[in-house]
Image (cartoon, rainbow, N blue to C red):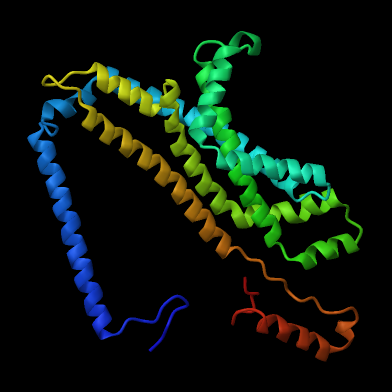
Amino acid sequence: MSASVLFDTPGPRARVRNRVFTAVGSLALASLLVFVIYRLDVKGQLDPNVWNIFNNAGVRTNIRDGILTTLKVFAVAGALSLVLGLLLAVARVSDHRPVRWFATGFIELFRAVPLLITIYALWVVFLTYKSDLGVVGDNAGFWGLVIGLTIYNGSVQAEVFRAGINAVPRGQVEAAHAIGLRKYQVMTTLLLPQAVRSMLPTMISQLVVTLKDTSLGYIITYTELLYAARKMATNIIVNGESPFTAVTIVAGAIYITMCLALSSLATWLERRGRRAKSGIVVAPAAGAAEHPEVLEAAEGDTVAAGDDTGRPLT
C-alpha cells in the first residue's frame, strides 16, 4: 500500500466510507440549493419582471460604470501596493537598524489595524482638509480608498517579498559578495529577480484580495460596483419591492468572475514557472579538444544530468 506525504492511501473500507460521505454531502448541498431556490420563488424574487430590469439601458450603464470604477481603484491601488511592498521589504532586510525597525513597525501596525478603519480614517482626513490637499468632488473617496488599500496590501506584499528574498540560498549571496558586488547590486541583480519569480503567484493572489477589498468603498459612499448596485437596487421598485436579491446576485457574479480571472493568471504563471528551463550544460575544460576522453566524459555528465535526449533537467 502506497502512502503520500500527508496521509496513507485509503483502504477498501475507507474508500467506501469516503464515497458515502461524498454522496451524503452532495445530497445535502443539492437539497440546500433547492430550498434556497424555492424560498426565492415564494418571495417572488424569480419573477421575470425582477430580472427584466437588467435589460434596461440605464441599469446596464450603472453596472458598467461601477465595474470601471472598481477596476480603476484596483489598478492604482494594486500598482502602488506592489511598489510600497517592495520598498518595505528592502527596508526590513536592511543592515541599518533604524530603517529595519521603522519598516517592521509600519508593517506590523497596518497589518493589525482593520482595513475598514484605515479607509474610513483616511476618508475623513481627505474630507476635512480637502481644500488644503487640493482634493475636490469624489476624489476624497477615491484617494481614501486607494491609499487605504495601498497601505494594507503593501504591508502584506512586503512580507511576500521578504519571504522570497529569504528563500534565496545563502551561498549565492556570499558568492556575490566574494566577487566584489555591493549590497545594492546583490539586491537588484540577485535577490529581487529570484524573489519576484518565486513569489509571483502569491503576489497575484494578494492582488485578488485587493480587488475584493475595493468593495469596502461603499462604506465611504464611493461609487464602486457594490455601492452602485446597492444604490440602484434602492431606487428601483418591482412588484412593490426593491430587487436587492437579483442585484446582489449579479454584482456577486461579476466580482467572482474578476477574481477568478486573476486567480487563473496566478495559476498560469505558476505552471509556466515550473516549465521554465534552468539547467546548466557543463562546458569542457580548456584543452579538452586535445584529449578526446575528457570531452566524452564531459558529454556523458551532461546527459546524466538531463533526460534521455541530452537536455538538462529543470
Picture residue at 65% right of the left edge, 74% below the top: 312
Q: Residue 237's spot in the image, x, y percent?
A: 18, 18
**Count of labels shown?**
0
Residue 228 appears left or right of 184: left
Quadrant position of the C terminus in the picture: bottom right
- Residue occupying the point 84% across, 64% down: 174
- Between 73 and 144, the residue placed more toward the observer is 144
Whole-percent x, y for residue 176 in the image: 84, 61
Q: Is residue 273 or residue 93 the one in the foreground?
A: 93
Provide residue 254's location: percent of width, then percent of height. 34, 36
Q: Image check: 4 left or right of 254?
A: right
Q: Image check: 98 left or right of 290?
A: left
Which residue occupies the foreground of this view, 207 or 36?
Answer: 36
Please determine whether, in this image, residue 87 is positioned above or below residue 225: below
Residue 153 visible in the picture? no
Quadrant occupied by the N terminus: bottom left
The quadrant holding residue 289 is: bottom right
Identify which residue is drawn at 44% across, 50% down: 264
Asked if residue 16 is positioned above or below residue 120 in the image, the reply reads below
* In this view, 186 is above or below 299: above
Query: Residue 197, relative to residue 3: is it above or below?
Result: above
